[in-house]
Amino acid sequence: MTPLHAPLPTSSCTAEERALRQELAACYRLIAHFRMTDLIFTHISVRLPGPEHHFLINPYGLMFDEIRACDLVKIDLLGRPVEPTRYKVNPAGFVIHSAIHAAREDAQCVLHTHTRAGCAVAAQPAGLLPVNQISMEFYGRVAYHDYEGVALNLDEQKRLVADLGDKPVMILRNHGLLTVGETPAQAFLRMYYLEKACDIQVAAQAGGDLLLPPHEVCEHTQRQFNEPARPVAEGELTDPDAMDLAWQALLRLLQRVAPDYRD
């Protein structure tokens, strides 16, 4: 029997692919570290450079805190491995992720979770509310997709893509959360704060009536989060390096607690 973590040949890996493998493996480890996993289920994928539309996804059967750069499976848009692998791929992951990668050039990384808070908000008719400053990063930027059953039907792909449109995050009704990003770092940080926004919302709702800021304040706060390089008014500050600094801090965390993710 082949050992679970026997090393795979990486001599054919370009430096760019190797870097993306390490970034994606970091995402898996961070989702595990912050307790956003669902055993071996849910997925994070990243598109590889080139016209082939190949992408990397998790090996079906590994826990997220096991995944290393060399374990990630390279598949095409039909879900077929494009190089030797001992692992399977979750078919539901292929249906969701391949559809988005094919439709959105900016969706280089796609991240999907089934967390308690995310699933709770996904079951609420109003969806994500501007309950807190963290929630307002996503004000007017959340897509919604109605539940159709376990994502095994290829026909659902066109509806999922249409519902996502050009939004950076989507709440899958009665299912979970999804974020996209131009990099794994961007997709992860969006998910981290989307999850936190859902958690805050569920906690606030348990306390009774909610106090929500006016539309104008929510719009202003959304721009502060998502347009850090915009022209600013006199006396206003910006923080354009915030997300890069946060990602580097997260990588240092992994280097301390799970340095084998890079292997």
Image: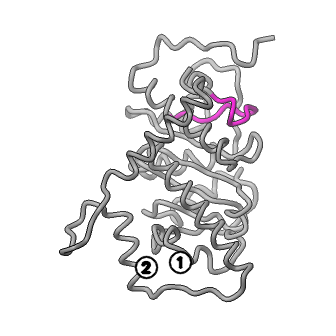
- Place of residue 185 in the rendered image (x, y in percent of width and height, measured from the top left): 46, 44
- Place of residue 112 in the rendered image (x, y in percent of width and height, measured from the top left): 62, 51
Picture residue at 48% right of the left edge, 68% below the top:
138
Please identify the quadrant where the N terminus is shown.
top right
- Place of residue 55 in the rendered image (x, y in percent of width and height, measured from the top left): 51, 35
Q: Decide: marks 2, 1 in contact (CB < 8 A)?
A: yes
Picture residue at 68% right of the left edge, 36% below the top:
64
* Residue holding disc 1: 130
260, 181: nearer the viewer:
260
* Residue holding disc 2: 218
Task: Mark 1: give few (<14), some (14-19) or many (20+) Cα within 10 Å.
Answer: many
Q: Is residue 63 one of those drawn in magenta? A: yes
Task: Mark 2: give few (<14), some (14-19) or many (20+) Cα within 10 Å.
Answer: many
Residue 116 position (above or below residue 262): below
Please identify the quadrant where the C terminus is shown.
top right
- Place of residue 15 in the rendered image (x, y in percent of width and height, measured from the top left): 39, 21
Q: Which residues are magenta?
A: 55-67
Task: Judge from the rendering whether residue 84 lies leftward or rightward of residue 223; answer left or right.
Answer: right
- Residue 165 got which mark? none
Residue 240 position (above or below residue 23): below
Task: Judge from the rendering whether residue 155 lies leftward or rightward of residue 184; answer left or right.
Answer: right
Task: Judge from the rendering whether residue 1 lies leftward or rightward of residue 43; answer left or right.
Answer: right
Q: Is residue 158 one of those drawn in magenta? A: no
Residue 227 position (above or below residue 258): below
> Tag 2's secondary structure?
helix
Can you tell which quarter of the image residue 82 is in? top right
